[in-house]
Image: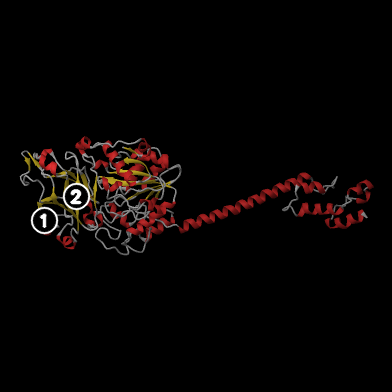
C-alpha cells in the first residue's frame, strides 16, 4: 500500500530510472509512513521558494532520512535567506521611490525668489519687483540656478536709484507693482509659531526709537537704530515673535558724537529695553560699517541657535541687510558656509522696503538657516511721508555733531537773542519739524542731533507762519522743489510738551522725532554767559510746541548720554540683587 501511494504521487516527477523502489526493505518503507508530507515538502521546496516554511515547521515535518533528489537542510536555509534578502530589497526600493516622489513635489511647488530682495521671480510685469527677462529665467531654470538670479529692481537699487515698492511710502499711493506694509507684516507673523532665534535691530543714532521697537523670535535678532531709537522700535513685537527669546542689536553706533562713553550708552539702552518688558537675552552695540560689536553677535548666535533657524528682524531701513553682510564677513573667518554665502547677499539701499520677502541664507555649516526679513513699516516715521527722492537726506552718513541754539559767542549769547533767550522764537528743522519755544530759562539750550543735510533756521514766532509758507521747498527742505512743496500737506500735528526738571545743570530730556533724530533739552547751559538764579528757582518746567507732518510721532524720553559731557552728567541707577540677575547684559 505504501509503495502504491508513493508511486502515485511521485510519478509526475519523472524520477531517474536508477531509483528502484522495489528493492526497499521493510525498514526503509517504514520511513515513508506519511507519504503526503514527503511529497508536499519536495514540491514546495522546488516550486514555492518565495514562501519558505519556518524552521520549527521544517523540523516538525522532517523525515529521519531523505532521498537523493530531496533538498538538504542547508539548501532550505539558503533558500530562506535569499527570499528574506529579496523581500528586504524590494521594501527598501519602495521606500526610496516614495521619498523621491515627495522631494520632487516639494521642489516643483517652491517659488524661486530674487536673492537680493526676496520677491518672487516673474517674467510678466516689467515694473514690478522680481522681474527677470524670459530668456534669463529659462536658462537659469534649466541649469537649476534660479537662486542666483537678481531681479531688475535690485540691479537698479544697487546702482543708487531710489525705487520704492511698498505702497504708502515715498509719497506714492501704491499700485499693482507695490506691496502693502500690512502684507509684509503678515509674512512675518508665522514666526511666532516657529522655534527660532530672533535678532532684532535698532539704530543707535535715533536711540529712543530703536530700542522701543525691537522684536525677536525663537532666537530672533532684533535690530534698532540708535539714531532713531524710539521710532525704529517695532510695536507689538510679540505678535511677530511669540515667546521666543530676543537678542537686541543696536546699529550705527559709529554715528554717535565723538567722545561718547559706550558704557553709559549701553546702560541707557538696557534701561529703555527693560521698561518694554521684552524677553531680551542680551544687548549688543554694533556698527556694520566698522564691524564694531559684530564678533560678539556672531559668537552669541553660534551659542544660542542650537540647530534652529535665525531670523533678523527690525523696522524698515534700520540696517538689516548691512548687518547681515557684516555678520557673514565676520563668520566667514571660521565657517566656510558663511564664506560661500557672501557671494549672494541681500541688496542694501536707502529705500525703505528694499527687502520684500524672507531671504534664506545658508550661513551655518552645523545646520539651521539665516533669514533676512522684510522691514516692518512704521507709519509714524518721517520716511513714510517724504518723497522717495528725499529719502537719502534722512540717512546720516557721518558722525553726528550736535547743533545748539542759542549759539554761544565770545561775549556770551549771540546777538540775535536777547536776555530772555529762546523764548518767543521758532526753530525749523528743514521742512519737517517746527519748535515754538513758549516758556524756558534764559540759559535754556536746544541741541539738534540728526542728518547734517537738514538745515536749521530760527525766526521770531510771530513771523514763523509766513517764513514757512515762503521758504518751503527752497530753504526749508525736504520737500525739495516748489512742485513737491505745493503737494506737501504741511505740519498738521502740533503737540504741546511740558518738560519737568529737578537739576538745571543736567539735561532734562530728549525730544525724539520718529525717523529723523532727537533734540536734547538743557534747562541751563553755563557757556551762554547768563546767570539768573531767580529764574531757576521759580521755573521747574519748560514749555514747547512741536509741529510735525501727520502721522509722524514725537517721543519724550530720558536724555541719552552722548559726547564727552554725557559721561559727566549720566547717573547709573542702583540695582537690587534680583534686578541684577534678570537684567540683560550689554556688549560692545
Quadrant of res 383 = bottom left
Q: Is residue 48 rendered to the left or right of residue 469?
A: right
From what the image shows, is residue 32 above or below residue 526?
Answer: below
Q: Which of the image's four quarters has the C terminus?
A: top left
Where residue 530 appears, as percent x and y from the top left, is 8, 40
Q: Residue at x 11, y 38 (%)?
A: 527
Q: Is residue 389 rendered to the left or right of residue 197?
A: left
Where residue 414 appears, as percent x and y from the top left, is 7, 43
* 253, 388: nearer the viewer: 253
Dot 2 crowding, Cα within 10 Å, few <14, some 14–19, many 20+: some
Q: Secondary structure at mark 1?
A: helix
Query: Which labelled disc corresponds to residue 464?
Result: 1
Q: Is residue 392 rendered to the left or right of residue 111?
A: left
Q: Which residue is mark 2?
A: 498
**Residue 472 in view in this figure:** yes
Query: Which labelled disc corresponds to residue 48?
Result: none
Q: Residue at x 30, y 52 (%)?
A: 316
Inter-mark Cα distance, 2 to 1: 21 Å
Quadrant of res 186 = bottom left
* 472, 379: nearer the viewer: 379
Q: Which of the image's four quarters has the N terminus?
A: bottom right
* 467, 363: nearer the viewer: 467
From what the image shows, is residue 6 above or below residue 197?
Answer: below
Q: Earlier in the sequence, mark 2 or mark 1?
A: 1
Amino acid at each position: 500500500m505504501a509503495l502504491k501511494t508513493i508511486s502515485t504521487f511521485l510519478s509526475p516527477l519523472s524520477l531517474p530510472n536508477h531509483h528502484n523502489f522495489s528493492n526497499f526493505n521493510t525498514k526503509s518503507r517504514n520511513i515513508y509512513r506519511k507519504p503526503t508530507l514527503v511529497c508536499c515538502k519536495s514540491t514546495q521546496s522546488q516550486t514555492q521558494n518565495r514562501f519558505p516554511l519556518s524552521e520549527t515547521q521544517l523540523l516538525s515535518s522532517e523525515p529521519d532520512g531523505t532521498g537523493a533528489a530531496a533538498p538538504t537542510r542547508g539548501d532550505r536555509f539558503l533558500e530562506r535567506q535569499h527570499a528574506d534578502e529579496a523581500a528586504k530589497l524590494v521594501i527598501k526600493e519602495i521606500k526610496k521611490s516614495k521619498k523621491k516622489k515627495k522631494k520632487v513635489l516639494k521642489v516643483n511647488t517652491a517659488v524661486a525668489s530674487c536673492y537680493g530682495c526676496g520677491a518672487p521671480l516673474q517674467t510678466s510685469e516689467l515694473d514690478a519687483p522680481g522681474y527677470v527677462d524670459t530668456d534669463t529665467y529659462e536658462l537659469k531654470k534649466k541649469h537649476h540656478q534660479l537662486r542666483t538670479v537678481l531681479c531688475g529692481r535690485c540691479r537698479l537699487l544697487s546702482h543708487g536709484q531710489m525705487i520704492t515698492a511698498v505702497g504708502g511710502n515715498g509719497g506714492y499711493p501704491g499700485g499693482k507693482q507695490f506691496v502693502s506694509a500690512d502684507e509684509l507684516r503678515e509674512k512675518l507673523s508665522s514666526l511666532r509659531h516657529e522655534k527660532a532665534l530672533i535678532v532684532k535691530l535698532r539704530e543707535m543714532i535715533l536711540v529712543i526709537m530703536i530700542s522701543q521697537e525691537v522684536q525677536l523670535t525663537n532666537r530672533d535678532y532684533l535690530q534698532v537704530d540708535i539714531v532713531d531709537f524710539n521710532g525704529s522700535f517695532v510695536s507689538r513685537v510679540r505678535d511677530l515673535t511669540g515667546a521666543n527669546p530676543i537678542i537686541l542689536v543696536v546699529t550705527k553706533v559709529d554715528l554717535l558724537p565723538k567722545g561718547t562713553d559706550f558704557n553709559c550708552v549701553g546702560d541707557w539702552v538696557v534701561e529703555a529695553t527693560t521698561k518694554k518688558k521684552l524677553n531680551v537675552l542680551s544687548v549688543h552695540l554694533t556698527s556694520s560699517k566698522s564691524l564694531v560689536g559684530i564678533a560678539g553677535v556672531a559668537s552669541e548666535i553660534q551659542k544660542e541657535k542650537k540647530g534652529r533657524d535665525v531670523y533678523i528682524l527690525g523696522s524698515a531701513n534700520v540696517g538689516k541687510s548691512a548687518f547681515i553682510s557684516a555678520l557673514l564677513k565676520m563668520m566667514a573667518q571660521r565657517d566656510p558656509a558663511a564664506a560661500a554665502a557672501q557671494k549672494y547677499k541681500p541688496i542694501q539701499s536707502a529705500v525703505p522696503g528694499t527687502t520684500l520677502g524672507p531671504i534664506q541664507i545658508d550661513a551655518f555649516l552645523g545646520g539651521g538657516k539665516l533669514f533676512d526679513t522684510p522691514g516692518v513699516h512704521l507709519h509714524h516715521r518721517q520716511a513714510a511721508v517724504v518723497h522717495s527722492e528725499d529719502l537719502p537726506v534722512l540717512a546720516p552718513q557721518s558722525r553726528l555733531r550736535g547743533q545748539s541754539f542759542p549759539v554761544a559767542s565770545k561775549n556770551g549769547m549771540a546777538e540775535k537773542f536777547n536776555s530772555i533767550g529762546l523764548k518767543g522764537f521758532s526753530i525749523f528743522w528743514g521742512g519737517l519739524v517746527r519748535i515754538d519755544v513758549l516758556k524756558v530759562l534764559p540759559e535754556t539750550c536746544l541741541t539738534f542731533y540728526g542728518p547734517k543735510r537738514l538745515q536749521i533756521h530760527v525766526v521770531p514766532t510771530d513771523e514763523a507762519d509766513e517764513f514757512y509758507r515762503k521758504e518751503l521747498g527752497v530753504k526749508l527742505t525736504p520737500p525739495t522743489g516748489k512742485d513737491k512743496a505745493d503737494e506737501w500737506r504741511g505740519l498738521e500735528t502740533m503737540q504741546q510738551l511740558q518738560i519737568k526738571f529737578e537739576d538745571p545743570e543736567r539735561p532734562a530730556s530728549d525730544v525724539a522725532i520718529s525717523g529723523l533724530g532727537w533734540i536734547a533739552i538743557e534747562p541751563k547751559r553755563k557757556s551762554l554767559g547768563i546767570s539768573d538764579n531767580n529764574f531757576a528757582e521759580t521755573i521747574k518746567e519748560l514749555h514747547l510746541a512741536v509741529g510735525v507732518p501727520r502721522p509722524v510721532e514725537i517721543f519724550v524720553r530720558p536724555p541719552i548720554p552722548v559726547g564727552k559731557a554725557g559721561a559727566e552728567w549720566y547717573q547709573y541707577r542702583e540695582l537690587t540683587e534680583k534686578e541684577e540677575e534678570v537684567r540683560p547684559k550689554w556688549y560692545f
